[in-house]
């Protein structure tokens, strides 16, 4: 089993519903976020292109945050999901420095926090909060090992890219372009 | 390449953010959100910290509601935890408005409930030691005072001199109260400041208004044409969902906008039109379609009136003619017209929503309606579907007295096609003049921040100074509440019952809103406030119920449901009873116009002395060094009413001033630099705004998101964040047909130095009269 996400940049409008849904679902303190939205504008008026991306932890296959964690708080569970165990975390911030995606933040309670792919929902057969709320249905979540999952199907039929592939982290968020 | 994080809330900025958290954690808000962790914790079996919390039983309830953060009114479930605290709001899967998916504002609705800046108790303006202050009073005292004042106005001037301004579900109760009192002067800024012209334009053409939610069949369209409509930034949920579905299906999107909107970035064709010239483009499109005979002759012959006159009228309005006006090249105009014709009738030339731009807006939306008529999209699959709604009988109530005067009397011979009262008109008619013998003396303002809603703020201030009574009913302190004599705190939509939602969609449906929690503080539901005030006015016969649930249950039983049933399901769908979703091919259609046909040539406009066919009129252009002030929406906010919501503030804290890089370079403006704007009348923005240097905006205009720059200090988060575009809208171009206030003819220049207090005060010369009060009395005294 390998959980992953495909996000269609052609449909995303950058409304940030994914961000607020995550904050509400996961009790992310006000002022912090586990996912966020970026916009890249390319070209000169009137020859322009915009790419809007909903970003989060890439749950990398080769996760530098897990390798550098001195206490083992950052770890990988079934499905390749990268998690942080708060009471093992000493808040040293090494993982924050090592992440090429800026996906982690220091929680006011003193530990590091990040996206969990809403594993608590996934275990109940639900999609992560961000995916389930998205008005444009631009996000697909599922098991890459299952060729019939939404995410496998989208990756099979569409062109995609990952972020910072040069970092060698083998990210598992795929942006359909 | 320019890159930006839409949400500048990543941990890089956390230091300042943490200070902020300390402040906001004082409120009761933190608690309710905090407890939601219990639920998450239980599910997160891996975490040690979480394990400690695991033992707590989690009993969750859910209560049906429909969202009140915008007019789309998506039905949803409000979830509470075992302590009865609000946890989250999730869309109702059965709801045709949202299909189980709320937009960011709906998802962030809990923030409205938790906002610690909410209005908490009734407040009354009093004078203490020569200073005007608000004092906390009981509901009894507040309502007694209002009733006495209202009766005084009725005795001296007539009950018609009281008006209601309303936005939102609860406005209906106050409308009912006012009609019972003897006035029909009930206005919503959503008409003359927003969608009014398009309704008049479509009624003149098809005999039917567009209505809300718009019956655009985007889901099945092959070609969607957006004219200044920025779907995706205006988060009209159902439409955005369907636009996404249309993208999936490969529909062609054509966007006409001087700004590279999000929708433009999703479009096959983006037409970066010169601002204020849309009419010329529309007429050229009509010309191309007629000249090339890209229309269904049989359909036109059978269903329309005035084709010949139209053909003659647009003969000279060629793409070459329009090119000189719009800067859109003739071959692009032809190519896009061809795309529309190819998709016909599965094409939508979108009527837009906020269409009060240049004062000829009814005529422009007429041109849009005519284009749709030529393409055969009205009542066609992939065009406009025929919505159907459920009619709920009105709860039995005595007849209203007949008013002897109406707002229309203040405007003899004007705005003859306005079907609803004009908020701006009532505001104007409040200012006494030598021509008017009776001006408005009392305003009830429900859920609408008139200062930030009506253009030309000086006129609004002037009107306010002329009032005997201004009552504001709201959930939050706003600019308008600062000017009120009495403020009545309503509880949020999550804490109250409201009328059953019956708006028409493809499938007729009803939706229930019920409270998920008791009203916080000393706030009350709108229905209760109206009823209690009614009693004080001796109008108890009109409020023949103890609790509003009696009304709802009675109404629901008339359509074969009940309150009990609706509490369980939230949304109930019904079968369509009045025909299909579309007209069938060759159907004989009777349109509700004078001729019974689609009027390409409008007889109703002609009868009232307006042009029966739309024409292009040039609009003023910005002088040197000035730029057209363009404004719009962001998906995470609903005007000024959401900017203080802690969850939505977190998504977007302030608006920026979009400036084209060429212009920024000319002025030496840098990204993030704080500047003030000054308009053509010397009015200066109330606060500075940060420059966003971006290629997404034309060199001849600037863009800001509407609703920011709150000047009420009681809004602890959003006070002074960003700037108010409304203050800069002082040139108002009135639509002679229906009184809409065209607001896109304002030009601004940049001030890099902070203006003096005197300069900033220009536009509100009433500093000695009734003042805006931000603090309650005891705070002032201490």
Image (tube, rainbow, N blue to C red):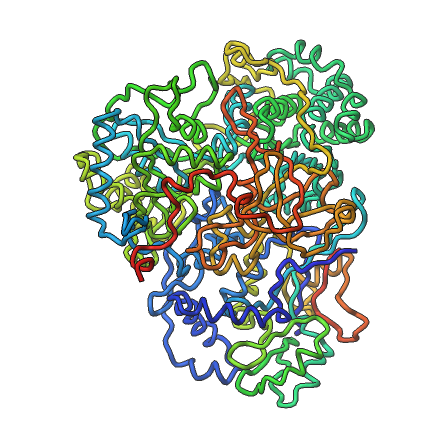
Nearest the camera: B455 or B281?
Answer: B455
Q: Does the image show residue B238?
A: no
Direction from residue B335 to residue B177 in the image, left or right:
left
Q: Between A31 and A49, which is closer to the camera in this rendering?
A: A31
Mark yes or no: residue B69 visible: yes
Left or right placement of residue B689 versus residue B469 in this view = right
For the image shown, how many numbered marks are present on the structure? 0
Measured from the top left, where is residue B401 in percent x and y?
23, 24
- Quadrant of residue B586 within the rendered picture: top right
Q: Tell me where residue B310 sits by quadrant.
A: top right
Task: Name the residue nearer the viewer: B745 or B697.
Answer: B745
Residue lying at 69% horizontally and 39% vertically, measured from the top left: B701
Quadrant location of the N terminus of chain B in the rendered image: bottom right
Screen quadrant of the C terminus of chain B? bottom left
Above or below, comparing residue B440 to residue B768 in the picture: above
Furthest residue toward bottom:
A71
Residue A55 is left or right of residue B204, and the answer is right
Q: Which percent across, then down, holds residue B364?
A: 62, 24
Residue B551 drawn at (x, y percent)? 26, 41
Question: Quadrant location of residue B173?
Answer: top left
- Image spot of residue B305 (x, y percent): 60, 12
Image height of A133 relative to B253, above or below? below
At x 75% / y 66%, what residue is drawn? Answer: A163
Q: Nearer the viewer, residue B37 or A111?
A: A111
- Which residue is at 36% across, 41% downward? B770
């Amino acid at each position: 089993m390998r959980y992953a996400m495909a996000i269609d940049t052609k449909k995303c409008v950058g409304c940030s519903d994914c961000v607020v849904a995550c904050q509400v679902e996961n009790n992310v303190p006000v002022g912090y976020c586990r996912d966020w939205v970026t916009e890249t504008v390319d070209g000169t008026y009137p020859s322009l292109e915009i790419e809007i991306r909903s970003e989060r932890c890439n749950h990398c296959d080769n996760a530098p945050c897990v390798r550098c964690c001195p206490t083992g708080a950052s770890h990988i569970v079934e499905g390749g999901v990268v998690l942080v165990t708060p009471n093992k975390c000493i808040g040293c911030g090494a993982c924050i420095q090592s992440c090429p995606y800026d996906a982690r933040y220091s929680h006011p309670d003193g530990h590091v926090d990040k996206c969990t792919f809403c594993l608590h929902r996934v275990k109940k057969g639900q999609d992560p909060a961000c995916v389930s709320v998205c008005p444009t249905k631009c996000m697909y979540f599922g098991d890459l090992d299952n060729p019939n999952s939404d995410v496998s199907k989208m990756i099979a039929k569409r062109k995609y890219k990952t972020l910072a592939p040069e970092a060698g982290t083998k990210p598992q968020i795929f942006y359909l372009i | 390449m320019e890159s930006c994080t839409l949400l500048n809330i990543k941990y890089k900025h956390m230091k300042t953010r943490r200070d902020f958290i300390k402040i906001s954690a004082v409120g009761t808000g933190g608690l309710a959100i905090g407890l939601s962790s219990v639920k998450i914790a239980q599910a997160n079996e891996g975490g040690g910290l979480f394990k400690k919390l695991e033992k707590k039983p989690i009993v969750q309830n859910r209560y049906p509601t429909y969202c009140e953060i915008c007019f789309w009114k998506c039905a949803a479930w409000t979830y509470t935890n075992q302590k009865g605290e609000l946890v989250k709001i999730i869309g109702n899967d059965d709801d045709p408005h949202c299909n189980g998916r709320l937009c960011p504002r709906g998802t962030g609705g809990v923030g409205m409930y938790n906002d610690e800046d909410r209005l908490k108790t009734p407040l009354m303006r009093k004078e203490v030691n020569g200073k005007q202050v608000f004092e906390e009073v009981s509901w009894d005292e507040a309502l007694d005072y209002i009733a006495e004042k209202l009766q005084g106005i009725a005795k001296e001037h007539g009950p018609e001199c009281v008006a209601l301004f309303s936005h939102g579900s609860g406005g209906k109760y106050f409308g009912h109260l006012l009609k019972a009192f003897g006035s029909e002067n009930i206005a919503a800024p959503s008409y003359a400041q927003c969608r009014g012209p398009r309704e008049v334009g479509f009624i003149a053409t098809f005999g039917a208004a567009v209505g809300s939610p718009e019956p655009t069949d985007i889901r099945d369209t092959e070609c969607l044409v957006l004219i200044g409509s920025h779907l995706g930034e205006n988060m009209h949920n159902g439409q955005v969902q369907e636009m996404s579905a249309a993208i999936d299906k490969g529909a062609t999107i054509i966007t006409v906008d001087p700004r590279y909107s999000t929708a433009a970035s999703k479009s096959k064709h983006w037409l970066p039109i010169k601002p204020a010239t849309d009419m010329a483009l529309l007429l050229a499109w009509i010309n191309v379609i007629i000249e090339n005979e890209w229309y269904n002759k049989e359909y036109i012959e059978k269903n329309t009136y005035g084709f010949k006159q139209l053909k003659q009228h647009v003969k000279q309005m060629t793409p070459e003619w329009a090119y000189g006006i719009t800067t859109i090249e003739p071959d692009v105009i032809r190519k896009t017209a061809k795309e529309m014709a190819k998709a016909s009738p599965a094409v939508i030339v979108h009527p837009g929503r906020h269409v009060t731009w240049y004062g000829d807006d009814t005529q422009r939306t007429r041109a849009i309606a005519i284009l749709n008529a030529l393409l055969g999209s009205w009542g066609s699959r992939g065009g406009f579907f025929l919505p159907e709604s459920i009619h709920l009988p009105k709860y039995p109530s005595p007849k209203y007295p007949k008013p002897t005067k109406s707002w229309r009397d203040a405007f003899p011979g004007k705005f003859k096609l306005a079907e609803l009262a004009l908020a701006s008109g009532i505001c104007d008619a409040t200012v006494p003049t030598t021509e008017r013998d009776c001006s408005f003396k009392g305003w009830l303002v429900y859920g609408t921040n008139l200062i930030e809603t009506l253009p030309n703020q000086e006129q609004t201030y002037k009107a306010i100074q002329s009032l005997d009574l201004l009552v504001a009913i709201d959930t939050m302190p706003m600019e308008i509440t600062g000017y009120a004599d009495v403020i009545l705190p309503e509880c949020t939509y999550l804490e109250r019952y409201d009328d059953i939602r019956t708006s028409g969609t493809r499938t007729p449906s009803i939706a229930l809103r019920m409270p998920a929690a008791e009203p916080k503080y000393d706030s009350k539901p709108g229905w209760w406030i109206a009823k209690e005030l009614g009693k004080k006015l001796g109008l108890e016969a009109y409020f023949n119920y103890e609790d509003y649930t009696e009304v709802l249950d009675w109404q629901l039983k008339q359509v074969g449901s009940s309150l009990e049933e609706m509490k369980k399901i939230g949304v109930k769908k019904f079968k369509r009873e009045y025909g299909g979703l579309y007209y069938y091919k060759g159907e004989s259609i009777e349109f509700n116009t004078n001729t019974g046909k689609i009027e390409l040539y409008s007889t109703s406009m002609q009868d009232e002395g307006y042009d029966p066919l739309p024409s292009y009129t040039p609009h003023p252009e910005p002088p040197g060094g000035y730029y057209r002030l363009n404004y719009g929406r962001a998906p995470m906010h609903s005007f000024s009413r959401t900017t203080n919501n802690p969850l939505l503030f977190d998504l977007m804290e302030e608006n920026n001033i979009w400036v084209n890089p060429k212009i920024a370079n000319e002025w030496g403006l840098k990204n993030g630099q704080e500047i003030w704007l000054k308009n053509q009348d010397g009015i200066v923005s109330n606060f500075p705004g940060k420059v966003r240097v971006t290629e997404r905006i034309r060199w001849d205009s600037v863009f800001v998101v509407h609703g920011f720059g709150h000047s009420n200090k009681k809004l602890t988060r959003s006070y002074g964040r960003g700037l108010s575009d409304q203050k800069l809208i002082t040139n108002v171009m009135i639509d002679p047909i229906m009184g809409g206030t065209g607001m896109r003819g304002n030009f601004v220049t940049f001030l890099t130095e902070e203006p003096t207090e005197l300069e900033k005060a220009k536009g509100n010369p009433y500093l000695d009269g009734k003042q805006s009060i931000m603090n309650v009395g005891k705070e002032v005294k201490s």
